[in-house]
Image (cartoon, grey):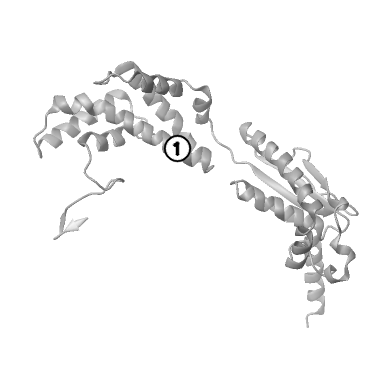
Amino acid sequence: MLVDGAPFFLDYQGGRKGALQYDIASLLYDGKADLPPALRRQLLDYYLDCLAEHIPLDRAAFMEHYYAYVYVRILQALGAYGFRGFYERKTHFLQSVPYALRNLRWLEENVRLPIALPALLDALHAIAESEKLESLSSPQRDLTVHIFSFSFHREMPADESGNGGGFVFDARCLPNPGREQRFAALTGQDAPVIDYLNHEESVHQFLAGVFSLVDASVAAYRRRGFTSLMVSFGCTGGQHRSVFLAEQLARHLRTVGVEVVVRHIEIEKMRAAEAALAGTLAP
């Protein structure tokens, strides 16, 4: 912020005056910085030399509490990485966790805090030695779920991933909107068809089973680093039930942060035929 053209106050996160140690600890022990210990100490000494030119500085008192603030900073960072990565499923945040673990291990071997905190340090030791957390340093590959609707009377969707296919669900056991004339020109993407199927309890039971199976596979595929899962829904004409179910699964997966690609095979053919017909009728 500027007051009368001069710097007046810099707000860092909390928006209040903080300890001198916190900012330099945040900079030198940032997860992605990954600085060697000797360089960290060199930069810290330079910071203190510059700071002493502006304010009275008790260097020994500063250093007595400095590494406690390093611990505070690492705990704050781990909490943010875990929340954004595990809970919000933004996996790129998890790639910083192993750097924080390395910093914890260095602190454990080289630093003695001014007060005894055995319970906290035991917990931090367990975190630092976690093989599961350390494994997050491996590259995270995103999973994409490819969802298809199709007609059993025509062709099955082709698996372009090379995995040999995936789930195929047969929706012909469900009530068929296609038997009613009012739905003949509509698809499972249209509101009247959606409303019709949403009022059928058997449809919701069918979807609950699908969600359970697919969710379990998504979790396993992500854990094992797989990048592609294929789920197909077939019905008689590939226009109503299968389309509706594919859209419902896509919406369900998107709400939990899964990348989804949806294709409706029969609708694509219908639209291609309509476009071709329109082209022949054009003057």
Name which residue lies at 15% across and 26% down.
61
144 shown above or below 56: below
Name which residue lies at 85% across and 68% down.
184
Q: In which quarter of the image is residue 175?
A: bottom right
Name which residue lies at 83% across and 68% down.
183
Residue 91 visible in the picture? no
Residue 27 visible in the picture? yes
In the current view of this chain or complex, which residue is farthest to the top? 109
At mark 1, the secondary structure is helix
Q: Quadrant of residue 2?
A: bottom left
74 relative position to 188: left or right: left
User: Which image quarter is the C terminus in?
Assistant: bottom right
Mark 1 = which residue? 81
Name which residue lies at 84% across and 49% down.
156
User: Which image quarter is the N terminus in?
Assistant: bottom left
Residue nearer the viewer, 278 or 27: 27
Residue 28 percent across, percent down from the top left: 30, 33
6 shown above or below 283: above
78 shown above or below 210: above
Residue nearer the viewer, 82 or 229: 82
42 relative position to 212: left or right: left
Q: What kind of residue is marked 1? A: Tyr
Residue 171 percent across, percent down from the top left: 84, 51
